[in-house]
Amino acid sequence: MKTLAICSLFLALMLITLPVQSVELKDGHPTVYIVKKGDTLWDISAIFLDKPWLWPEIWHVNPQVDNPHLIYPGDELKLVYIDGKLRLVRTNDEKLSPQVRVLSEGDAIPTIALDVIRPFLYSPRVVTDEEMNTAPYILAADSQRLIYAEGSKLYIRGVTDSSLKGYSLFRKGDPYIDPETGELLGIEAIHLGSGTMTRGGDPATMMVTESVQEILSGDRALPFDDKVFPPVFMLRPPNFDITTYLISVYNGVTQIGTYDVVILNKGERDSLEVGHVLTILQSGRVIKDPHSANAKNEMVTLPSEVAGSLMVFRTFEKTSLALVMRSNRPIHVMDTAVTPQ
């Protein structure tokens, strides 16, 4: 029930902290919708609104209902006018009876598809070159194997704090370079698994408790990230103008689509925050203009076009991880994301 209360609090805060923007109904929207298992608030909002993150501005709160911001499979949602203002109401609230509705805290639909981003909340990291190069490293195992996995006993060098027990295991990945300035933004730390330090010293001893990829000698160990992520994301556009590039994408895809995770070249130092929603622009193609009076076959860059939207769900100093929430045309690395208009 504690999680349920926290979710209600976060959603209530959304209603009073979102910047005021014009709410535009989507062409062809329904007037009634029955919530289904697997829905998210974003999915439902996208059915009714052109800007799904603005759903709290039309959501009608009934103070007579416990946890009024929580929506469940089977609920009927209806567009109505209340005091001259368009509102989305849960019609179940209008037919209250003395019966008790028993629901577990996991039944309420989430803001976004949490299962998609859960593996990215704690595992992948962007670190500095120094952090990676000075992190404790795997020297060997107590067996003759060259590839280690769950259950392996490893010997680690470079451990300076014997009080830390939980570690994530990483391998140095590609550098992230700012496409505009050429600045090194960080190094991808490829998540390999987890381990628990069982004995200090040099070398220290670690037991591998989880492995998601093969682990090798020379791979690095970093303390668990203890940052607490919100149970509900407060979706809102930044209250400032920003343009950021999609500099990489996880899973090695070439065309980025809905629910892909991308890396942005802006982060905490640029005031990006968890929950910020941005519009993705597909970069305009460069083509020859054979009809130009200025120069034969003049090269012209076509205008960028709206390709979708994304939500920032994890931030580092110079970079961020974002989930593509919607795509209406192919998205590629080096496309941009901007403050929604």
Image (cartoon, rainbow, N blue to C red):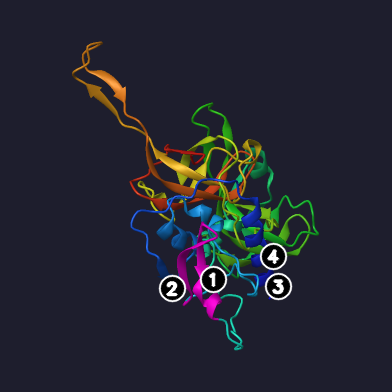
Closer to the N terminus: mark 2 or mark 3?
3
Q: Are marks 2 and 4 in contact (CB under 8 Å)?
A: no
Residue 113 shows up from this direction:
no
Q: Separation of disc 3 and disc 4 at Cα?
A: 29 Å
Q: Which residue is mark 1?
A: 71
Q: Are marks 2 and 1 in contact (CB under 8 Å)?
A: no
Q: Which residues are magenta?
A: 74-95
Quick check: 143 above or below 314?
below
Mark 3 or 1, closer to the camera: 1
Amino acid type for the residue under numbered disc 2: Lys
Residue 40 located within the stretch drawn in magenta? no
| Residue 196: numbered disc | 4
In the visual, does 200 lie left or right of 268? Answer: right
Quick check: 1 above or below 339?
below
Q: Separation of disc 3 and disc 1 at Cα?
A: 17 Å
Mark 2 or 3, closer to the camera: 2
Q: Which residue is mark 2?
A: 36
Amino acid type for the residue under numbered disc 4: Thr
Residue lying at the far top of the rendered structure:
294
Closer to the N terminus: mark 4 or mark 1?
1
| Residue drawn at point x = 41 percent, y = 39 percent | 281
Q: Which residue is mark 3?
A: 2
Q: Position of residue 20 (x, y in %)?
A: 58, 46
Q: Separation of disc 4 and disc 1 at Cα?
A: 40 Å
Instruction: Pick the residue in front: 301 or 252.
Output: 301
